[in-house]
Structures are given as C-alpha cells and as structure tokens.
Image (cartoon, rainbow, N blue to C red):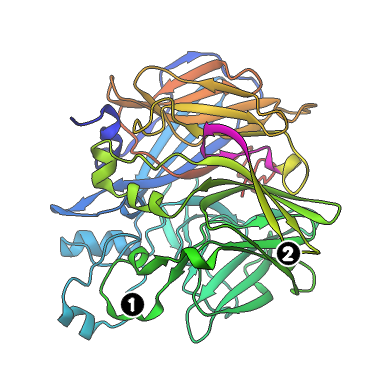
Amino acid sequence: MTPPYAIGFETATEEATIDALPLTGTLPEWLTGTLIRTGPAQFDIDGEPYRHWFDGLAMLSRFSFQAGRVSYVNRFLASDSYQEAHEKGKISRGEFGTTARTSFWKRLRDPLPRPTDNANVNILPLGDRLVSTTEVPQPIVFNPDTLETLDKFPFDDRILGQTTTVHPHFDFDRQCLFNYLIAFGSPSKYNIYRMGFHNSRRELVASIPVKEPAYMHTFAMSDRYIILTEFPLRLNLLGLLTSGKPFIENYRWKTDRGTHFTVVDKSTGEVVKTCESEPFFAFHHVNAFEQDDELLIDLIAYPDGRIIDDLYLEPLRTGRSGNAAGKLKRYRLNLNSGDAIGETLSDETIELPRIHYRQANAKPYQFVYGVGNQILNNFNDQLVKINVNTGETAFWSDENCYPGEPVFVSAPNASAEDEGILLSVVLDADRKQSFLLMLDAQSMSELARAEVPHVIPFQFHGQYFPSIHPAIDLSQIHR
C-alpha cells in the first residue's frame, strides 16, 4: 500500500507566481521578510529515474511577507545538470545515489565522474549574493526576487576540493564564515577555510591529510574550535574512479574505525586533539560549546549509516524507511584525555534541526526544533521542540500532514531564546497540496497557514532573510 506522503516524492509540474496566497490566521506584524528554500523536485528524465531522494533536480521556492499577506514564487534551478538532462532527454551527470556512467565503455571514455551542480540542498549568502548549494562546491547564484538562475558563484582563490558541506558556520565576532573542502588524492585532505561575509576569496585555515575521507554532511563550531566529526563511513577512492557506482555507494561502513572528533583551532589551524567514540552516524550537528576542559557537541545520531539506504526513493515511496529515526545526543569531548562520551538527551525522534542560531550557536542553549515521527515509517509527521536541559518536549501535528524543516525566526527585541515563530512547509496529503505553517515557537501553537495551490516536493533546507535589498540581512541566518 502506498503511504499518503508518497506524493511528496513525485515530480513537480507547476511553476507559479502568486501575489497573495489564501491565508487563515494572522501573521505577526513584524514578519516582513522572505523565506527561500530549495529541494529536489524532478525525479526522472523522460522515464529514466533518479534513485535517491538527494538526487532530484532542484527547485527553489520563495515566500515573502508584507502587510499581512504572503506571496509565493517557485522555479526550477537551471543548473548545467538540469539543462543537459532536458536537452539530451536522459540523466547526464551522476548524483548522490544515481550514476550516469552505466557501462564499462562510458567509464573508459569518461574515467572521472562529471561533477553535478544540481544545487538542491541549502540556500546561503555568499559575497553579497544568494546561492543555492549542494555538496559539490559549485554554488549557483540566483535572483532572489524572480528566482531566475544567474551563474555559478565565482570564488576568487584556488583552494582545491571535490566535495564540501552546504552548512558553513557563521562567526559574527570574526565577521566570516568557516567551511571545508575535501580534496581527493594520495593522501586526500580536509581543507578548512574562512571567508569574509562580503568577500569571494577563501583563506586556508588548515589542511589535514586523511587516507580515507569520511562522509560528513555538517561539522560543529564552538567559540575557539572547528570540529570535524569523522564517522566510520569511509571513501574507497579507487572505487569512486573505477566502479561506475553512484557517489555514495563508494563509501563503506567500517565499525572498527570508530568515530573521530578532530578538533581544530580556528585561529592557528592546529589540530588540538582527536577524540574517539563508538561508531555512529549523523547528518546534522545541532550546536557545540566549550565548558572548562570539555567540548560539548550536540547532534542527531543514528547507530550506523543505514539511514542513507532508507532515503532511496523506493523505500520512501513504499513506507519502508524504518531507520529514519534520529535521536538528539550530546558528546562530551575531554580535550586532555581524548575521550568522547555520548548521552541521549531525548527519546523523541528528530531531524532537520534548527536553533536560535544568532543568539545560541557556540554557547550553552536551551531549545532545538526539528521534524519527527509519531508513527514509525510514516516519514516526518510532526514538528518537535526539545528542551536540551530538561528533556521536556512539545509538538505540532495534524492528520495526514507532513512538515518540513522548521525555520526559527526570532521576534524583534526578544528577551527569551524561544521568543519567535517557526516557518515550515507542510504537505497536506489529503488535500494534495502544500501550505506554509507559522507556529508560535514558545507554545508550538498554530498562528497561521498560507495555502499553496500544488504539492511542493519535500525539501531540505532554507533561510529566512528580514531584508535582501539593498543588503542581505544576516541576523536570522542559520548554519
């Protein structure tokens, strides 16, 4: 039996520009900015299917708030991957879980996989422009008003790397972001860099050699440190070059390797300590902060890397993604002994975590928000708020409604960490359309919803900007 949420994994057929969406409830008067999100929205090319949720061709969506109204625009991102696929009528570049090099002869003619620029994972401000990003380091610049695709972002440097993370950290004291590239070679290297908020030149902070790079979707940042969490999902580089398998299928789970937390000084680039824990996996870090001789790292943990297999489209569409249930865990890293001890902060399932980033990142904090499961194998059927200090929880849910990442927007002059609202794009499976949900973040009670006239396929990440013109306001940015 096909689960009701499966329509969120079907190809989008509409692009729309709507001045005012039908609205129930009332928006806060201070909500006058723009929410921009990205995600996969086309899952086959002329009948040739993409295999993994992470593979679908990107679509941008924008919700703008003004005078109590919500306007809406959605557009496919005209990446090279998108244009080539439509011109040729077939998948032309390999994605996370789909290969375009399906025969030995194709691999012989094209020994290196062509990098995709299908930027379907996150929205970021880079050098005074807005870009859509994926884990290949080719961000795509777009017009924030029309969502028209413009060009690739022109980095003004020669730092090498074939993969990256779409979740840089923003350091407001230093007025720069931190991120890293993974450069494949013998040895491979983690190239950590900083880049000023208004610059396009990256500066190398550290270059750390590694024999078998780990798959890492995010990293952690405290006041003084960058922390790379190296899970034992390790790359077979020779396989990547010769096997013809999709990118992620060249990684192998190596239980005996354990998980390594590589702690790097942000100022000097020195590796201060490598701490080790039991093997586990995570996509998303939540927060990190320093406490005496310890580093506390909060993340959404899984026992192993099987969660990646559960996010292939076939198990998702048939209700068999049973491992997609992450738990909020805290690891205490002792910078003297090198020990890393984990504890579970809540038994609730949670993913796509957000915090009050500007106020709480790299500091002791109280609240994390995310999507979760009331019913296993029912995809994301509720929004969750967890108090990391007490374990208390609060929820929002509605029958056959499937929410996406809750974007926290703090209220002006807020005195409490959770004073603000949550914005979440929700699929209403019964009505076969999506809506933008607005919740009071303190009470998790519904304030309003704006109805979209079609299904927005399940997305990954996005950002809320209080203003974009004449300059991008970063006060509500998230990693």
Q: Quadrant of the N terminus?
A: top left
Question: Which segment did they paint magenta?
Answer: 344-357
Q: Which mark is residue 434?
A: none
Q: Earlier in the sequence, mark 1 or mark 2?
A: 1
Q: Main secondary structure of the magenta part?
A: strand
Which of label 1 and label 2 is nearer to you? Answer: 2
**Foreground pick, 55 / 230:** 230
When the figure is inspected, residue 338 is found, relative to residue 391, above or below; the finding is below
Distance from label 1 to label 2 (Cα)?
32 Å
Q: Which residue is mark 1?
A: 239
**Which quadrant holds residue 475?**
top right
Q: Can residue 71 be seen in the rendering of this structure?
A: yes
Residue 411 quadrant? top right
Q: Is 224 situated above or below 439? A: below
**Which quadrant would residue 245 be assigned to in this image?**
bottom left
The residue at the far left in this view is 47
What residue type is disc 1 on?
A: Gly
On the image, the x and y values in percent for residue 200 come to 62, 68
Q: Residue at x 27, y 35 (%)?
A: 319
**Circle 2 sits in a helix, a strand or a loop, which is it?**
loop
**Amino acid beneath label 2:** Gly
Q: Residue at x 75, y 40 (%)?
A: 359
Label disc, if present, on residue 338 of the rendered structure: 2
